Image (cartoon, rainbow, N blue to C red):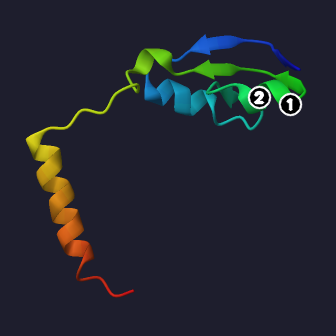
Amino acid sequence: MINIQKYVRAKSLEEAYTLNQKKKNRILAGMLWTRMESGNVPVAIDLCDLGLDKIEENEEEYNRLLEIEKNMEFMPD
């Protein structure tokens, strides 16, 4: 079992990234393997408020991805 000392709901990706720079801090996700571990987690970082639960596609991004794919065809292995 793990012991979480502080629970933080990140308000931005930058905040989550900064908090995650300390090696023992953890991003909460799934929790299956985390529950099987033991030890202390100084800061548990929750990403649920960051809107990462969906994928949005728009014309500009689609065209950019096509351009990247096209350029990769000409790259040597």
Q: Residue furthest front?
A: 32
Compare residues 13 and 28 and report the one nearer the observer.
28
- How many numbered marks appear? 2
**Amino acid on which the number 2 mark rests in the picture:** Thr
In the image, residue 35 lies at what x, y percent?
80, 24
Question: What SS does tag 2 mark?
Answer: helix
Could you tell me if the residues under marks 1 and 2 are in contact, i.e. CB atoms within 8 Å?
Answer: yes
Q: Residue at x 90, y 27 (%)?
A: 38
Residue 68 vs residue 26: left or right?
left
Residue marked by disc 1: 37
Q: Residue at x 18, y 71 (%)?
A: 70
- 27 over 58 or under it: above or below: above
Q: Residue at x 62, y 21 (%)?
A: 45
In the image, residue 23 lies at what x, y percent?
74, 38
Rendered-image quadrant of the N terminus: top right
Residue marked by disc 2: 34
Q: Which numbered marker is on residue 73?
A: none
Question: What SS does tag 1 mark?
Answer: loop
Question: In the rendered image, is residue 11 in sight?
Answer: no
Question: In the rendered image, is residue 37 in sight?
Answer: yes
In the image, residue 4 lies at what x, y percent?
79, 15
- 39 over 74 or under it: above or below: above
Mark 1–mark 2 Cα distance, whole angstroms, equals: 5 Å
Rendered-image quadrant of the C terminus: bottom left
Residue 24 vs residue 73: left or right?
right
